[in-house]
Amino acid sequence: MIGKTGRAERAGVTRERILTAAERLFAEHGVCAVSNRQVSETAGQGNNAAVGYHFGTKTHLVRAIIRRHAEPVERIRERLLADMDDSADVRDWVACLVRPVTEHLADLGPLTWYARFVAQVATDPALRAIMAEETRASPSLRQTIEGFNRCLPELPAEVRAERGDMARQLITHTCAERERALAEGTPTARSSWHDAATGLIDALVGLWLAPITPDP
């Protein structure tokens, strides 16, 4: 029994090392540009097949990285929702979309790769579908979107879809660019993830409440 427990613990440590290495490599170089062998070597595994052994395909590895971060983001959003009291303010619901991500990035420490990893995944149609599938599995996110839709002004369907795409792009790439700047030691517009979230929320509220120019 002790032997089995020890092996399970070692396997768990190895999986974590592989996930960390893969997240960093994918964030810095892109998912397609990184091989499973490179991930194994960066994770300090003598066996170049370690990724396949522990995760299967690269697609499975990407999904595992997404799930690794989904739980803490979910907990933060659940906490924010508990304080919402069914708000009718668009800003409150936008904050519930943004702050779980930025707060999680702040909790990870001064050097992170997750925001850039998400931005890389977003450029690949197949991997983006995986991200969307995992995102839809979040009960707190579904609740947030329902609350947001209840207080959003009436918008034509095509405008709502267009602005939804814009909002996703803004959240993804604003976080990724700030994370990159922090990693490179270059100046950032805001001094903290909390303040960066505030600026992002301001922009998104303006985006969603902006007037619609009528067709000529």
Image (cartoon, helix red, strand yellow):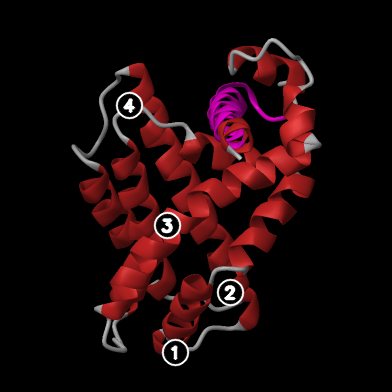
Looking at the picture, which amino acid does disc 2 mark?
Answer: Val
Q: Is residue 47 above or below residue 104?
A: above
Measuring 65% from the left and 41% from the top, which residue is drawn there? 121
- At numbered mark 1, what does the secondary structure look like: helix, strand or loop? helix
Check disc 3: other Cα within 10 Å, few if <14, some if 14-19, many if 20+: many
Disc 3 or disc 2, which is closer to the eye? Answer: 3
Looking at the picture, which amino acid does disc 4 mark?
Answer: Leu
Whole-angstrom CA distance, mark 1 to mark 2, is 16 Å
Q: Position of residue 184 (x, y in %)?
A: 36, 18
Disc 2 or disc 4, which is closer to the eye? Answer: 4
Q: Which residue is mark 3?
A: 73
Q: Which residue is mark 4?
A: 182
The magenta segment is 8-31
* Magenta span main SS: helix
Q: Which residue is mark 1?
A: 150
Q: Is residue 193 above or below residue 135?
A: above
Q: Which residue is mark 2?
A: 159
Please say if the residues under marks 3 and 4 sit with CB atoms less than 8 Å apart: no
Q: Nearer the viewer, residue 111 or 124?
A: 111
Measuring 53% from the left and 57% from the top, which residue is drawn there? 168
Q: Is residue 143 visible?
A: yes
